Amino acid sequence: MSTTESSRGVIAGVESPSVLDPPGGLRALSLSTPARPCRHRTIVSSTLLVVSLGAGVTACGSGGHPLSAKPYDAADQISFSAPTGDGEKADPDKPLEVTAADGRITDVTAVDATGRYVAGELSADGARWHSTSPLAANARYTVRVSTENKDGAPGRETLAFDTGRPLTKKRLNVTFGPEAGEYGVGQPVTATLSVPVEDKAARAVVERALKVDSTPAVEGAWHWVDDKELHYRPKEYWPANATLQVHSNLEGIKIGDRLRGGKAKPVELTTGDKIVAVTDAAAHQMTVYRNDKVIRQIPVTTGMPGYETRNGVKVVLAKEGTVRMTSASIGAADFYDLIVHNSVRVTHSGEYLHAAPWSTGSQGYANVSHGCTGMSTGNAQWFYDTINEGDIVQVVNSAGDTMAPFGNGFGDWNLDWKKWREGSALVGGTKEAPRPEVQARLRPESV
């Protein structure tokens, strides 16, 4: 998108959409085409504003105002860097440039056949617009240009062109996780890359193309776990009964000198009720909440000294049912080999919540396990039937360390929002944006 305010691509305080992002809110023309001869700044009240706008329409909508005229054909006024002849294709490695030989450019929209938009910047004098994000290879683009002559009359020009095939065959494919289905409100979205990406600029290209759209909308961000893995989560837990659409717009986009985006299978996820189980290791009690209301309190036992249960927020990884647990799995000095029922896994290293009929005398009174959370068979059966993958298990007041954010399951929620955003190649170090509902009010669909 473009702007008439500056050369940085900012329209009325709203950044132009980045590459691959469809424009939201106010339409570009409405924002970028100034009604110079008729400006109303009345903001005393909503009533006066309506009166002022009505007066403006009367004064400016008739009587020969330039903007009321049908747009003229600006073909002779505009030149493009992309070839337009039959069979000719633009180099996707070169930026798209639009220049005005006479008058000025007021808006440029470039979009490919799949709906991916190209970000760009307009010079302060309106003489030149250029793309600031890479074009996709082997794609069909439509460019719409709005202009203004010296008398303020609007012009229009539309151009279509194709980009050529990339010379390099190296592709970066993306695998999203988890698999399609219903999960708890704590489930992060993951993106695993087939090729490592270290360069910050290249990471920004990748991250910008990976989309997570939620209904209802919530604020969220990607976090680079390492060179080949990203996690996405909202500022707070996902809303209950939400729908998440996860997809990539990276295919064909240049990431580096010899690397372009490849394929990615989209995924649809849904969330169920908000289930949160909070274990107070000092009180030996677990309180289970459904949609923020207490539905059960369960006496438990957690890790004994030397095997303390980890503090912090954990996400249920799997409901594994009957599991054989041995001392060798955690390196315990004292031997045990047990068949354990109603087992719910929360770490890769082997921390579970499960039935522990051998410790019912200690449940509610003492911590005697090797790190797991044990409960009676009846309570464990109820918990197993209630909890689901992606639900939240939180431990407080344990003498153990806090669960690491990554590497042993999903400890993502143990990073506060500020630190989480710092792991993004796009929003790290930037000011936090308004909440989605506030943005919606700031950017109405029409004016």
Image (tube, helix red, strand yellow):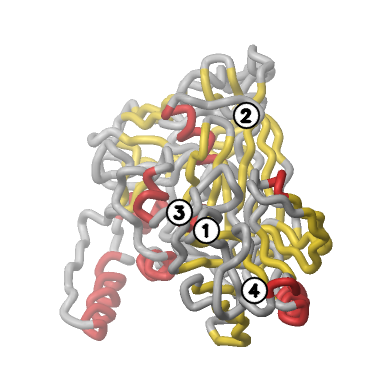
Secondary structure at numbered mark 1: loop
Which mark, residue 197?
A: none
Can you give x and y, in whole percent of width and height, for residue 190 in the image?
Answer: 61, 46
Q: Are marks 3 and 1 in contact (CB under 8 Å)?
A: yes
Which mark, residue 308?
A: 1
Q: Residues within 10 Å of mark 1 (few under 14, many from 20)?
A: many
Residue tagged 3 = 401
The amino acid marked with disc number 1 is Glu
Q: Nearer the viewer, mark 4 or mark 1?
A: 1
Residue situated in front as seen by the camera: 142 or 277: 277
Please tell me which of labels 4 and 3 falls first in the chain: 4
Check the image and report above or below for 196 versus 231. above
The quadrant holding residue 196 is top right
Secondary structure at numbered mark 3: loop
- Looking at the image, can residue 387 be seen? yes
CA gap, disc 4 and disc 2? 32 Å
The quadrant holding residue 78 is top left
The amino acid marked with disc number 3 is Asp
CA gap, disc 4 and disc 3? 33 Å
Which mark, residue 241?
A: 4
